[in-house]
């Protein structure tokens, strides 16, 4: 009888821990990682979120990517990927550094859209009219902007 009681208590304990584990906030979020978006409450709606220094010597691929970015991405992400408050985030931000968002993440975001998870601007819809190769060029442009702004 004592073994049966211990087994039942153990099951309740394990079940309680499982419920707690699944209900608790993400460990990364609760740890206050460095990928926190800036406070944009003082920035006018539609205004750039960050200042971006544009390098004068973009690679050939980044120049192609710049044209594609201006045609398909700047409407939301702003000129030179500086973001637009209340519309879309800046891509020249630590959140999008290569170690956190890989180049393939950009391809998948353009192809499939993205559920809002870092910023409170709503979900990003898929981008029509861009091939994977186009997005790779856009990504090269963004990476060169990031590097010029101290984001590696």
Image (cartoon, helix red, strand yellow):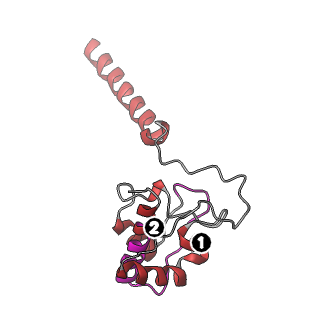
Q: Mark 2 sits on what residue? A: 145
Residue 115 colored in magenta in the image: no
Q: Secondary structure at mark 2?
A: helix
Picture quadrant of residue 77: bottom right
| Residue at point 60%, 73% (across, down) | 76
Residue 95, percent from left and from top: 47, 55
- Report the magenta residues as a range: 117-143
Q: Which mark is residue 78?
A: 1
The spot of residue 148 in percent (x, y) is 44, 63
The number of discs equals: 2
Asked where in the image residue 151 lies, by quadrant, the reply is bottom left
Q: Secondary structure at mark 1?
A: loop
Q: Residue at x 49, y 66 (%)?
A: 114
The residue at 62%/60% (across/down) is: 49
Q: Residue 67: x, y in percent?
A: 48, 84
Mark 2 nearby-residue class (10 Å; few <14, some 14–19, many ≥20): many
Q: Which residue is at the far top?
A: 2
Specify the quadrant that holds the C terminus.
Answer: bottom left
Of labels 1 and 2, earlier in sequence is: 1
Q: Is residue 106 left or right of residue 6?
A: right
Q: Residue furthest front?
A: 56
Give the label on residue 25, or none: none
Query: How packed is label 1: few (under 14 Cα within 10 Å), some, or many (20 or more)?
Result: many
């Amino acid at each position: 009888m004592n073994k049966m009681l211990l087994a039942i208590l153990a099951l309740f304990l394990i079940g309680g821990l499982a419920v707690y584990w699944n209900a608790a906030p993400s460990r990364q979020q609760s740890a206050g990682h460095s990928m926190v978006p800036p406070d944009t409450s003082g920035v006018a709606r539609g205004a750039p979120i960050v200042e971006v220094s544009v390098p004068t010597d973009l690679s050939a691929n980044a120049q192609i990517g710049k044209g594609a970015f201006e045609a398909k991405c700047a409407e939301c992400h702003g000129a030179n990927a500086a973001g637009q408050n209340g519309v879309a985030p800046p891509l020249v931000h630590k959140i999008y550094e290569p170690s956190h968002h890989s180049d393939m993440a950009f391809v998948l975001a353009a192809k499939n859209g993205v559920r809002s998870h870092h910023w409170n601007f709503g979900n990003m819809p898929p981008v029509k009219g861009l091939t994977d190769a186009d997005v790779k060029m856009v990504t090269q442009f963004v990476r060169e902007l990031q590097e010029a702004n101290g984001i590696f």
